[in-house]
Structures are given as structure tokens and as C-alpha cells.
Image (cartoon, rainbow, N blue to C red):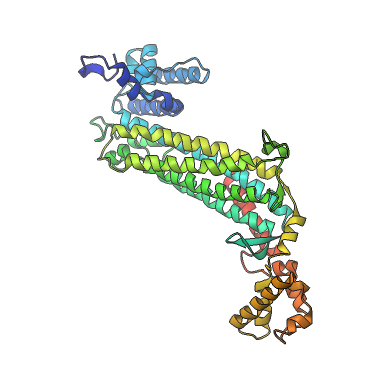
Amino acid sequence: MKLWGGRFRKETDSLVNDFNASIHFDSRLYREDIEGSMAHARMLSDCGIISPEDNRQIQEGLAAILADVEAGRVEFTADNEDIHMNVEALLTQRIGAAGKRLHTARSRNDQVAVDLRLHLRREIGEITDQILDLQQAVLEQARAHTNTVMPGYTHLQRAQPISFAQHLLAYGEQLKRDVTHLADCKKRMNVCPLGSGALAGTTYPIDRFETARLLGFDGPCSNSLDGVSDRDYALELLSALSILMMHLSRFAEEVILWCSWEFKFIELDEAYSTGSSIMPQKKNPDMAELVRGKTGRVYGDLMSLLTVMKGLPLAYNKDMQEDKEPVFDALDTVELCLPVFTGMLDTMTVLPENMRAAAGRGFINATDCADYLTKKGMPFRDAYTVTGQLVSSCSALGKTLEELTLEDLQSVSPLFEEDVYEALNLENCMALRASYGGPALAETTRQIQELETFIKDREA
């Protein structure tokens, strides 16, 4: 008989049993379920609701079940539907009447809510560590390329000269925000729903603050109805993971472009590339492409749970059993992508000469030319027009701005002097962009130091 079977006279149909069961995916919550149960039993004992002897048997029984599960000696069954009833059935089978007292003053509704919060809290820590590893890879490449000139792009058109370090550090900043998104999410989810019961709390004199403290929460949920009926913390996590994957996808797209023959700014290590079954010359950036593709999968997980939750009246509804699979899938996907991306970035070879050659074309020093005239006294809009005329002439002649003679330059404005060539030099163009956040060496050094400090503070 099922643990909830007292009211029922008929056996559950086998199809319904399979349809209703969640053990095939929520079994991964076994550790959290046991931790929550151990804290609940201790609280019940401290409050005089169960005896110290019952508590001792429960603690020892649950510890033994945890060890057996981790050793692969336990086989969960769909007959017991979910992880909660599987653990309770095992406990009762092993220790008898004391096991039947464990569920006093709680419901599966608050039980699953606490299990999921505990699990997500642990997963946030693991994902944060993986992001910090990726940031370290960004940091190492940035340190090596503070003076590597490359074209910065807008609209995928060459725009202005920057360093490869600055480009990488932009992703370092995005990843910093990803870490703080996860930290904020963890803080908001860190309240304990245990004691909410099915929805209206309990008549037993429980101590919800003790349970929260034992499980490392900041305190109990303030409203028992809210404690069991919302999954906004899971949605917030899925949102944070979707933003993280968006950042990885954009980074992956650039890696894909950079290693193509059309750019050839980098070369991926063979350990992070694949070949073609028919074209022997191919070296494909499949890891980056998969990260880009899996981003849509995480987006789908977010939309799935949003859709599940959008029309549910308070409090718990069986629809909410559908919360775990998208959450677990998103966690698994992110935790698969991050280490691969880190290894890919760590082992790639940067080709500075190709970046510099690309920077030399595309008139990315045109703004500097206009700025030169402005500093000589010409209004910026006039300087913009003059420089545009020069770019047009260069395009027709197949020249760069630096290749124009001083006579060519002075034919459009007498303000040009010999020092214009210093202003047009790409290394100087980059070095003079020393405004806060720019690509000048002092600024990229500052950004590198800030990222180093960020990583150390989070690892501490």
C-alpha cells in the first residue's frame, strides 16, 4: 500500500503509477531529502514532539540510507512515486515505528520545496566556481595580449583600434555580473520552507527557526502558503543561467569567427576541435558551436517553467512536479559547457600579426584623424566631413590614411602637419585611448587587476 493510501480502496492503475511518478528524475535530490529529514527529526525531538530515542534511530537510519545510496546499494522504485516516499519507505522498513514518525508536522509540499532550494544552493556554488575558472582563462590570455592591436567592431565592421586584452576583458566583466546574478539569486532563495506543511503550517509546536538554522538558511519563509506554492527562485536561477549562456554564446560566436580563414585571429587546439568525415582539411570549432546551440536549450528550460507556473492558483498543484526537469537540464547543460569553454580558451593560440594586419585595413583610425583636426581648432562635424572625404579618396586609390602624403592631406585642410602621422599610428591610437575603461595599457592593466581581485575575493 502507498504511504498515502489510507483513503483509497482501489490500486493505482499501472499507467497512472508511471505517469504520476517522478522518481526517475527527482532521485538526484536524495542527499538533500535526507539532510532535510535529519534536520526535521532533530527539531521534532528538541520540541518534544518525538522522543530522543526515535530521533536517534531516525538519524542513524537516514545516515545508513545515504551511505547505501552513494555506494549504489539502493534501488528506488516508481511504486513509491518520488524520492521523499522512497526514502521514508526505506527508513520505515529498516527501523520500524520510529520511521513512521518522521513525517509528523510536514508535507511532501514543504519537503520538496526545501529539497529543491538546498539542491539549487549547492549547484550555484559549483557553477560559480566554474565561472571563476573561465574568468581565470580570460585573465591569462588578457595578460599576454595587452599590447596586441586588433580592430574593434560595430555592426561586424571594423571600427576602432583596441587591444585583444580589452576585448577579452569585456567578457570578463560580463562573467563578473553572471557571478553576482547567481549570488543574488542564492541570497533570495536562502529561506526555509520546512514547517509550511501542505500550505497552512501545522498544529504541532514546531520551531521553524531551528530547522532553518540546521540547514544553513537565513530563516524560515514568512508565509506558509508562499513557502510551498512558488518557484520564483528556480525561475530566477534559470534566468541567470540563460543570461550566462547568452554571454557564452556571443563569446563562442566570436571564437568561431576568429578561427575561420576569413579572420584567422586565433587557432584552436586540436584537443578542442573536430574534423570532417569527408573533407580532410577541416578543423571545425564544434565545441564553440555546441555552446552556441545549447544556449537555446537553456532558454527553453526557462520558458518551460514560466509556462508551467503562469496560471496556477495558490497553493501547491501537481503541475509543479514539472519544475525539476527543466531546472536539472539547465544546470547539467551549463555545467557541461563551462569547463569545455574554459579549456578551449586556455589552449587556443592567438595570432597577433593577423590581428594587426586586419587593424591596418578598414580605416579604423578615421575617428583619430577627425579628432586630430578638432584639436587643431576645426569643429568636430567639419572634421568628420573632411575625414570622410579622405576615406572616400583612399578607397578609390586603394590606400590607407597613413599612406597619404602630407600634400594629399593638406589639399583638403591646411591644418594637417607632419605630426598627423603620429596621430594615425594604430599603436598610438590605442595608447591614447586612456579614458576610464579604454584600451590604453594603464587601463587594461587596471581592468586585469580588478578581475584578479574579483576572482580572489570570490574564491576566498
The quarter of the displayed image where residue 227 is located: top left
Q: Position of residue 339 (x, y in %)?
A: 61, 39
Q: How many marks?
A: 0
Say whether residue 130 is visible.
no
Which quadrant, please, contains the N terminus?
A: top left
Q: Position of residue 316 (x, y in %)?
A: 28, 35
The quarter of the displayed image where residue 15 is located: top left
Q: Position of residue 109 (x, y in %)?
A: 31, 31
User: Residue drawn 64% across and 57% down?
Assistant: 167
Is 168 positioned to the left or the right of 408 in the image? left
The quarter of the displayed image where residue 423 is located: bottom right
- Eyeballing the image, is 260 above or below 95? below
Q: Position of residue 95 (x, y in %)?
A: 38, 13
Which quadrant, please, contains the C terminus?
A: top right
User: Residue drawn 75% across and 56% down?
Assistant: 354
Say whether residue 401 is visible.
yes
User: Residue drawn 31% across and 22% down?
Assistant: 50
Q: Nearer the viewer, residue 248 or 315?
A: 248
Is 315 positioned to the left or the right of 407 in the image? left
User: Residue drawn 69% across and 53% down?
Assistant: 263
- Eyeballing the image, is 456 above or below 374? above
